[in-house]
Image: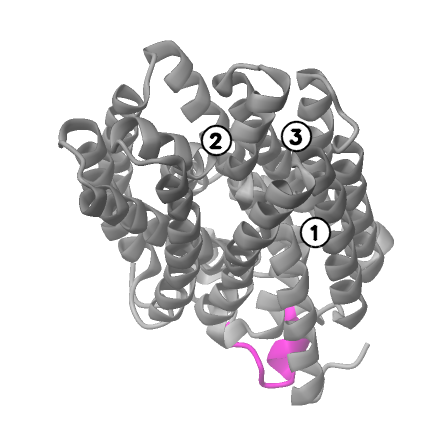
Amino acid sequence: MKTTTPGNKRWMIVLGTVLMQMGLGTIYTWSLFNAPLVSKFGWELSSVSITFSITSFALAFATLFAGRLQERFGLRRLTASAGVLLGLGLILSSQAGSLPMFYLLAGLVVGYADGTAYITSLSNLIKWFPRHKGLISGVSVGAYGTGSLVFRYINGSLIENAGVSAAFLYWGLIVTVMIVLGSLLVREAPQPQQMATAGKAPAAVRDFTVKEMLRTKEAYLLFVIFFAACMSGLYLIGIVKDIGMQLAGLDAAAAANAVAMIAIFNTAGRLVLGALSDKVSRIKLVGTTLMVTAIATLTLSFATLSYGLFFTCVAVIAFCFGGNITVFPAIVGDYFGLKHHSKNYGVVYQGFGLGALSASFIAAMLGGFKPTFIVIGALCILSGIIAVSLKPHVSGKDAAAKGMSLKPYGGTA
């Protein structure tokens, strides 16, 4: 395998990854489908909205196995197959007439395919740019958010003009083309040692295997932090239109603008905080955004919401959520190395799916949006405290091993 790749070739890999991530990010438009499905089939809103939680859980669960599948089938073949599977899940959803079928197709199938392509293409791109993990993660994950922004209008138009069932058909066809085309442009990154030999990588952090990572307390603390960081954003994304109508008294058209608001600030957070994380301590940056998120969620719980205050809280939560899920892949690389990054991040990434499911169950148990946001706010405060006090894992063995530095990049921890 060659250890170098011309700059223009690397940027073609960026282009292919961005195209795939945009197609994958379209699942964030799910809240547009809640009300039309309720209207067409007469189901409870809470039952329909669980679909997105299932999608998010399946997405996270898929990341546990994606690294092994990539080793067996290769990045291009795996991401192309995932794109086809995701498209089929959406296309077949156009024929679904029961909640269990939506849970299976739009939930499990779409989520699993999305997570498989998401983590493998993201980890691969980070390996191509090891000196700028935060920035390049922001570009990749930012494209994921941009997909939700663009398709807020595309899917909204499809629902209005073709009906909710037909919208799934066209949505599936479009994203299949996007992901498969993107997969043709990507190329697997060389191993970190080869990148270092070619002068493209910084001094190595020890490369932990999954088993080695799970022997450190930092792995579990990072999981808790990621769990809290994901819960607020995923809960909001799934029901933001409904929150706007019920808590802020907005009409359906005005509340639908919150979907675009989330997409814009979600993407902005990914790009801004991703780039910033290359210059400051990533973990302390996450701690700060969790505290800000707590303020916004508690405001939604206790304040009388005006139009402006509602959209401000939505923008803040989306910005911080987008930034946090962008910075976390780089944090995992900082703490545990890049060689086994997709597998290690896949373990920590389970906080994403559990965060989505937990918020839905908390909402069901507590019976409303406001008490759910109180719980989320409290968890964000606790996790923010953990984040700002977390240190890198350093054992005597690690410190002595070949003179390797274990201090995370992006500032001191």
Q: In this view, does 372 lie above or below 68?
A: above
Of circles 2 and 3, which is in front? 3
State left or right for residue 226 relative to residue 28: left
Label number found at residue 356: 2
Span colored in magenta: 192-203
- Tell me, what colour scheme is on the image? one colour
Mark 3 neighbour density, 10 Å: few (under 14) some (14–19) many (20 or more): many
Residue 232 location (% of width, % of height): 36, 36
Residue 223 in view of the camera: yes
Residue visible at 23% across and 29% down in the picture: 378
Q: How far apart are marks 3 and 1 (CA)?
A: 16 Å
Determine which residue is flagged by label 1. Answer: 117
State left or right for residue 196 relative to residue 100: left
Residue visible at 76% across and 25% down in the picture: 96
Which sits in the foreground, 335 or 364? 364
The earlier-in-sequence mark between 2 and 1 is 1
Label number found at residue 107: 3
Question: Could you say whether the residue bearing mark 2 is in a helix, strand or loop?
Answer: helix
Question: Could you say whether the residue bearing mark 1 is in a helix, strand or loop?
Answer: helix
Q: Judge whether residue 197 is colored magenta.
A: yes
Residue 11 location (% of width, % of height): 64, 81
The earlier-in-sequence mark between 2 and 3 is 3
Q: Judge whether residue 338 is colored magenta.
A: no
Q: Residue furthest left?
A: 303
Residue visible at 82% across and 76% down in the picture: 1
Of circles 3 and 1, which is in front? 3
